[in-house]
Image: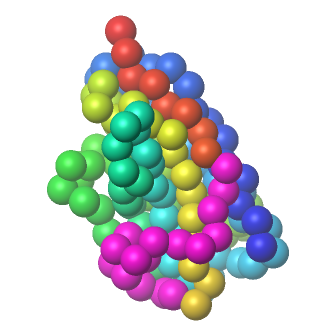
Amino acid sequence: VQLQAFGGGLVQPGGSLRLSCVASGFTLDRPAVGWFRQAPGKELEAVSCLSTNNDITHYPDFVKGRFTISTDKAKNTIYLQMNDLKPEDTAIYYCGTELGLSSSYALCHIGPRTWGQGTLVTVSS
């Protein structure tokens, strides 16, 4: 089971960026998947989770309306579309999954045990 994230970069405040995470060793039809981030000097936090068996999503308040998680099952890929980015969104972003967990809410609150490598997002003018 592996996850490989990419798509980070430098973006100006108010801009958009889409992160991708390619999954291998499992299919996106049962487990919950999610995106998490860690900013310098801060704790790891969940930014979006999705239940792949019913497409129910969970977002914390600080990204609601700005971030959207989705999957392309044909490509076995998880996406995070980030709009209206703010400097405080600067962080290393990780995708993750917990194969025995199907609830997006639970994944966002418990956290995954399978992680992709991080991809750095920098929001700055």
Residue 74 occupies quadrant: bottom right
Q: Total of numbered circles in the picture?
A: 0
Residue 74 drawn above or below residue 92: below
Residue 7 drawn above or below residue 51: above
Q: Which residue lies furthest to the left in this view?
A: 61
| Front-lying residue, 104 or 52 | 104
Q: How is the image coloured?
A: rainbow
Check the picture and name the quadrant holding the N terminus. bottom right
On screen, residue 35 versus residue 28, left or right, reads left
Give the magenta part as a residue range.
101-117
On screen, residue 103 versus residue 112, left or right, reads left
Can you give x and y, in whole percent of width and height, for residue 14 in the image?
Answer: 29, 23
Residue 123 occupies quadrant: top left
On screen, residue 76 versus residue 96, left or right, reads right
Q: Which residue is drawn at 56% across and 43% down?
A: 19
The answer, for residue 117, to whether it is visible in the render is: yes
Check the picture and name the quadrant holding the C terminus. top left
Can you give x and y, in whole percent of width and height, for residue 53 in the image?
Answer: 52, 85
Can you give x and y, in whole percent of width and height, for residue 87 in the image?
Answer: 30, 25
The answer, for residue 104, to whether it is visible in the render is: no
Q: Which residue lies furthest to the front in this view?
A: 41
Q: Residue at x 34, y 74 (%)?
A: 109
Q: Which residue is drawn at 31% across and 20% down?
A: 13
Residue 26 occupies quadrant: bottom right
| Front-lying residue, 5 or 79 | 5
On screen, residue 74 versus residue 121, left or right, reads right
Q: Which residue lies furthest to the top in this view?
A: 125
Residue 79 sits inside the magenta stretch: no
Q: Which residue lies furthest to the bottom in this view?
A: 100
Can you give x and y, in whole percent of width and height, for residue 3 in the image?
Answer: 71, 60
